[in-house]
Image (cartoon, grey):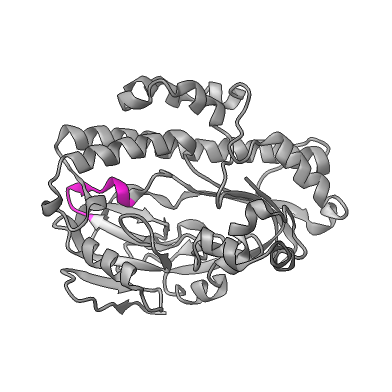
Amino acid sequence: MPYEKVTIGGAHSDILSWANHEFSIEEQSMLRNVSRLPCLFKHVALMPDAHLGKGSMVGSVVATKDAVIPATVGVDIGCGMMAVKTPFKSGILDGKLKDLRLAIEQAIPTGFSEYGESVDESSYWEGWKDFADLHPGVRDRKAKAMKQLGTLGGGNHFIEICLDTENFVWLMLHSGSRNIGKELADRHISTAKSLWKLSELPAPDLAYFIQGTPEFAAYWKDLKWAQTYAMKNREIMMARLLEVFNKLFNHRQPFKPELQVNCHHNYVALEEHYGEKVFVTRKGAINADKDAFGIIPGSMGAKSYIVKGRGSAESFNSCSHGAGRKMSRGAAKRAFTKADLECQTAGVECRKDAGVLDEIPGAYKSIEKVMKNQEDLVEVVAEIKQVVCVKG
């Protein structure tokens, strides 16, 4: 659908929304606060999956001039998706879905788990040479960061084996910068807040760094490092996922992927929009520049989409990062039962216990409606549905 302008009393800049739903009092307040930032460029763009977050809404795109807002970026810096299309059809998986799930869980640590020692791919990563230059508060975290590189984490992070509409097998995963990204984010958010008086900001979580200051330079350096760590994290997991897959189904032989995509959906990039260089913060949104590939997942029982961007100027070349939550984790646990989870994930080889109840499909918006609302932002390349889902 085309965007609509959201009218909120007290807003200083336009709010363009592809979300097509009414906003709560809390969401309106958050949007109003962001719109009043003096560093905001042009307008706020809300993606179809927009919902309440911290500082700014998840599913929002906030462009700023000569400034970056660390809380708007969030604490899972560089969180994103990676997918690989294989040349194999679904028949090779017959009768082996549970074996595949258990093999994945054995090869890749999930939840709070990590490797006993850093895996080779992690140990040789060139990013470690810059670790000593990161924020002083994290410099004793290197050993942990090395052991977590190539691990999934928990929450809404997942690894999936999917089938497209032509029955080709896809491998897909969702993860970010693990604990080291959160540690860096927390410290820089605290620093940003210390630089301002409460009365100078629309809200404390919107404390920002101004380009040209030492604090901005320190955050920008650490931000780029964490985003690179997150990208590498997904690459290592995908390499290990491919090893598991090839061992079970391809006589341990590697294959050439038909398509491979690795994209952030929680990050900042310096880009040109409306003829000016600006910092674009995509918080729960992906780059949908003209012909850029992206991944938009549904929930653990719903479809996902591989897309190409259409390059919409009004969205700052962006689109949604997924279905988006319609219920908080606590609300989902209160509203649904284990039996509901089993019903809503029927046909998917996955955990069906209380530990993942907050990730039940019913806690998320309809991915089909979300995709309908952004037909002007992306073109669908492939529609895929999971048959195996590994959660932390």
Front residue of 191 and 366: 191
Residue closer to the observer: 182 or 259: 182
Residue displayed at 55% across by 72% down: 366
Magenta stretch containing residue 65, yes or no? yes
Relative placement, left or right, of 201 versus 23 is left
Q: What residue appears at the point 17 percent right and 32 percent down from the top-left corner?
A: 214
Residue 357 location, x and y as percent?
Answer: 63, 58
Q: Is residue 284 above or below residue 235?
A: below
Res 153 seen here: yes
Above or below, 321 against 154 in this view is below
**Residue 40: x, y in percent?**
19, 58
Q: Could you tell whether 239 is left or right of 93 in the image?
A: left
How many circles with numbers are drawn on the protein? Answer: 0
Q: Residue furthest front?
A: 334
Report whether 80 appears left or right of 166: left
Picture coordinates of residue 126 (x, y %)?
46, 24
**Quarter containing the C terminus:** top right
- The picture places residue 307, in percent across and down from the top left corner, at 52, 63
Q: Is residue 261 magenta?
A: no
* Quarter of the image where the N terminus is located: bottom left
Residue segment shown in magenta: 64-72
Above or below — where is 225 with respect to 82? Answer: above
Question: To which quarter of the image does residue 25 belong?
Answer: bottom left
Residue at 41% over, 50% down: 266
Q: Front-most of 291 and 351?
A: 351
Name the outermost residue toward the right.
95
Q: Could you tell me if residue 171 is visible in this image?
A: no
Q: Nearer the viewer, residue 319 or 73?
A: 73
